[in-house]
Image (cartoon, rainbow, N blue to C red):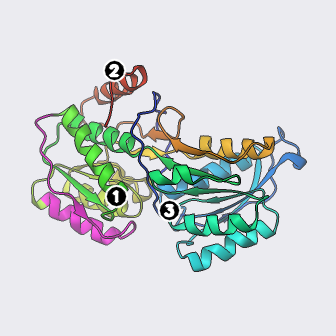
């Protein structure tokens, strides 16, 4: 979900929820070319994702972070994709551990059980596991846990949608999971805060993180009900939402770069993850010998949550949306705005 949008800055909100999605495409790394770190200090990283790294969303965020860290000379890495099946992922994790990888990253809720299972067998190897809000307290001496602040993602996305003035607003979500429903609840709060007169159509679930065809059909159905903007939480379904919304000439929020230029042409903005600061911190902890015993949450404060520059869509969206969004972020930072 990583994009080149402006960095959101502000204080962490007290309500913390989580997202564990799927997706990533394979990539393997060779020797780093950076000069700041000697070869002896380069951290060897093995990483796994459940889906494809070209999703322009959750999974690509990890791939982009790893590549950037390799370019900086901090790591060598190997990234395996399509690892959602524990029967396939656990042997890969064990293989990384037995080969002497310094850090093994399980990026996605599907990988958590396999990570913890292998970590018990290799106490001297460092691992990370991601999941829902409960994952934060499941850390061990050699496993750090990670999630991201769902209230921030949902609320900020809803605030953007509300600021457009578009109504009714439709939502296409993946699965009826707790964190997905939590994101939607905070999205609705954000819409109402920005535009109290906006109406929201009932949420439609595509039944998958990656079924673009189902998401496109859901979007077309919402447009048929009068939706002037359709929101989605990214991943593979965003391609379908973006394409169908663009074809219908309605706005979207949350569409990933993988959807292509035509779909992005009517996408106002997307709140995304940037895994670089999180993964860099893990790498530095491994190098310093103080890894483990904690959980971390991506937030606007630590740079783990970012947003795509606001697209005015040929004048359909007011020029002051970005300004008002920055005001919201400042309010979060000084405590005058709370969420949850």
Residue 158 in which image quadrant: top left
Helix, strand or loop at label 2? It is loop
The residue lying toward the viewer, choosing from 261 and 71, is 71
Residue indicated by mark 3? 109
Residue closest to the eye, 281 or 77: 281
Residues shaded magenta: 196-223
Q: Is residue 77 left or right of residue 13?
A: right
- Does residue 16 appear left or right of residue 198 in this picture? right
Image location (x, y in percent) of residue 336: 33, 20
Q: Position of residue 71 (x, y in %)?
A: 73, 47
- Compared with 264, 92 (above or below) is below
Say few, some or many: other residues with alpha carbon within 10 Å of mark 3 (under 14 / 14 to 19 / 20 or more).
Answer: many
Q: Which residue is mark 2?
A: 336
- Of the numbered discs 1 and 2, the one sitting upstream in the chain is 1
- Asked if the residue at tag 1 contacts the one at tag 3, i.e. Cβ–Cβ closer than 8 Å, the answer is no
Q: Residue beneath label 1, please?
A: 178
Q: Are marks 2 and 3 in contact (CB under 8 Å)?
A: no
The C terminus: image quadrant:
top left
Residue 43 appears left or right of 178: right
SS of the residue under disc 3: helix
Disc nearer the start of the sequence (2/3) = 3
Q: CA distance from mark 3 to mark 1?
A: 13 Å
Residue 128 appears in the rendering: yes
For label 1, the SS is: helix
């Amino acid at each position: 979900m990583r994009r080149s949008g402006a960095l959101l800055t502000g204080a962490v909100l007290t309500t913390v929820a989580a997202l564990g999605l799927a997706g990533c495409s394979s990539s393997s790394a060779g020797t780093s070319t950076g000069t700041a770190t000697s070869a002896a200090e380069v951290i060897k990283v093995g990483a796994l994702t459940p889906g494809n790294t070209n999703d322009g969303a959750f999974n690509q965020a990890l791939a982009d972070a790893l590549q950037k860290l390799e370019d900086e000379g901090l790591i060598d890495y190997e990234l395996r994709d399509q690892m959602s099946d524990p029967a396939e992922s656990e042997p890969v994790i064990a293989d990384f551990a037995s080969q002497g990888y310094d850090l093994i990253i399980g990026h996605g809720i599907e990988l958590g059980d396999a990570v913890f299972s292998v970590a018990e067998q290799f106490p001297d190897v460092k691992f990370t596991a991601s999941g829902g809000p409960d994952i934060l307290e499941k850390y061990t001496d050699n496993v750090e846990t990670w999630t991201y602040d769902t209230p921030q993602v949902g609320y900020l996305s809803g605030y953007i949608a509300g600021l457009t003035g578009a109504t009714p607003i439709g939502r296409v979500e993946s699965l009826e999971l707790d964190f997905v429903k939590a994101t939607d609840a905070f999205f609705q709060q954000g819409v109402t805060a920005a535009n109290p007169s906006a109406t929201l159509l009932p949420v439609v679930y595509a039944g998958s993180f990656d079924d673009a065809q189902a998401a496109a059909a859901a979007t077309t159905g919402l447009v048929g009900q009068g939706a002037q903007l359709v929101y989605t939480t990214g991943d593979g379904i965003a391609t379908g939402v973006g394409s169908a919304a663009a074809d219908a000439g309605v706005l979207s929020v949350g569409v990933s770069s993988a959807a292509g230029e035509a779909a992005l042409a009517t996408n106002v903005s997307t709140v995304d993850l940037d895994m670089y600061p999180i993964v860099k911190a893990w790498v530095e902890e491994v190098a310093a010998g103080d890894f483990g015993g904690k959980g971390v949450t991506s937030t606007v404060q630590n740079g783990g949550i970012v947003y795509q520059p606001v697209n005015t869509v040929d004048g359909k969206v007011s020029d002051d949306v970005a300004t008002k969004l920055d005001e919201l972020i400042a309010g979060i930072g000084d405590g005058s705005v709370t969420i949850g």
